[in-house]
Image (cartoon, rainbow, N blue to C red):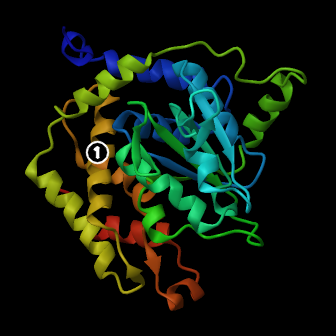
């Protein structure tokens, strides 16, 4: 069977254009974040979205599942949520006299972990094995998750009372962190003008791509070429985060792998089978911003991870 890319090098680029165009019918003013989320889905990663309430974080995920026509689950994280509420639990069957496993909401294609920082670390950790290995272990038995398993977690940057900061190990499982800001006046005016009171914005979205096609595109990512100069460029960027004077803990090797994978995804959706330094520079901030722990004095001076990453990007020579 001929692959999507081999049969038509621009096929993936066209599919991406169709997906983003369809998503923008429901989600206004978030083109860049939609693009990043789509590329992260293609490379098999997971996304953390940070933004104040009411910006459309949940709408983005619902719209994506509508465009792919796949199963989507939503978990509202609360302080009393237990790990079994996510993974599932063993239930005793009176008729058979045996315990059977009842799947939790994590057994889905796209999982929306809403306000993930509102639940204790024990429950947050229930996602660790699932996100890394795409499987769940309950009472010593392992259950495989679907081949397309994509976690999108949200958190509110304003409210801190009753929240639990995600530990570094959990943060490192997220491929990228997207920042959602208020839409422009033009987009907000269009939102008001086109809103229907009794219908969801994503309800009329049409399916653009199947799960099988997404899995095939993931296989095509393996054939994207990365020259040694680009690999050393990625290595230099990642290592620079570990040596920066205002950074207490820099990016991990896993972060470097995610930069590489996201660069491949960024290249393939543009119809290319090779990675350029611009592909790398484009995704450095969303992939690394949540993995850096700054020195306290740097935070007191008002430094943010994006500022440090921009400084690093400007300081590392770009390979030709």
Residue at the spot x=30%, y=30% of the render?
218
Q: Where in the figure is residue 192, as x and y percent of width and height?
A: 85, 31
Residue at the spot x=64%, y=66% of the render?
120
For the residue carrying disc 1, how many other residues have a C-alpha within 10 Å: few (<14), some (14-19), or many (20+)? many
Query: Could you tell me which quadrant the N terminus lies in?
Result: top left
Residue at the spot x=42%, y=40% of the render?
40
Q: Give the residue at mark 1.
A: 261
Query: Who is closer to the viewer here, 313 or 76?
Result: 76
Query: Who is closer to the viewer here, 84 or 161?
Result: 84
Query: Who is closer to the viewer here, 143 or 217?
Result: 143
Asked if residue 2 shows in the view, the reply is: yes
Is 159 left or right of 242, judged from the image as shown?
A: right
Q: Where in the figure is residue 281, as x and y percent of width and height?
A: 33, 53
Quarter of the image where one finds residue 24: top right
How many numbered circles are shown? 1
Is 31 left or right of 318, judged from the image as shown?
A: right
Helix, strand or loop at label 1? It is helix
Is 317 left or right of 292, judged from the image as shown?
A: left
Of all residues shown, which one is farthest toward the right?
A: 197
Q: Where in the figure is residue 83, as x and y percent of width and height?
A: 59, 55
Residue at the spot x=42%, y=31% of the render?
146
Quarter of the image where one finds residue 71: top right
Of all residues shown, which one is farthest toward the left?
A: 228
Asked if residue 320 shows in the view, the reply is: no
Is 184 rendered above or below residue 309?
A: above
Is 228 rendered above or below residue 34?
A: below
Is 83 rendered above or below residue 224?
A: below
């Amino acid at each position: 069977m001929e692959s999507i890319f081999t049969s038509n090098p621009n096929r993936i680029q066209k599919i991406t254009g169709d997906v983003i165009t369809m998503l923008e019918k429901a989600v206004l003013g978030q083109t860049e974040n939609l693009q990043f989320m789509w590329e992260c889905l293609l490379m098999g990663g997971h996304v953390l979205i940070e933004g104040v309430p009411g910006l459309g974080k949940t709408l983005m995920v619902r719209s994506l599942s509508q465009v792919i026509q796949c199963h989507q689950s939503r978990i509202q994280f609360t302080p009393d949520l237990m790990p079994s509420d996510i993974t599932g639990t063993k239930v005793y069957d009176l008729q058979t006299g045996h315990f059977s496993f009842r799947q939790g909401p994590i057994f889905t294609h796209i999982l929306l972990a809403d306000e993930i920082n509102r639940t204790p670390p024990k429950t947050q950790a229930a996602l660790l094995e699932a996100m890394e290995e795409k499987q769940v272990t309950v009472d010593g038995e392992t259950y495989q998750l679907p081949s397309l398993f994509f976690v999108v977690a949200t958190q509110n940057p304003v409210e801190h009372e009753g929240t639990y900061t995600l530990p570094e190990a959990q943060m490192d499982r997220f491929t990228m962190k997207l920042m959602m800001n208020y839409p422009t006046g033009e987009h907000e005016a269009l939102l008001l003008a086109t809103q229907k009171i009794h219908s969801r914005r994503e309800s009329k979205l049409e399916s653009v791509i199947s799960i099988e096609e997404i899995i095939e595109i993931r296989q095509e990512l393996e054939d994207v070429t990365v020259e040694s100069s680009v690999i050393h460029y990625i290595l230099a960027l990642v290592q620079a985060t570990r040596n920066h004077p205002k950074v207490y803990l820099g990016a991990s090797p896993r972060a470097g792998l995610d930069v590489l994978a996201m660069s491949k995804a960024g290249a393939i959706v543009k119809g290319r089978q090779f990675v350029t330094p611009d592909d790398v520079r484009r995704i450095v901030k969303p992939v690394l911003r949540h993995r850096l722990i700054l020195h306290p004095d740097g935070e007191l001076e008002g430094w943010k991870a994006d500022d440090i990453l921009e400084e690093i990007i400007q300081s590392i020579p770009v390979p030709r």
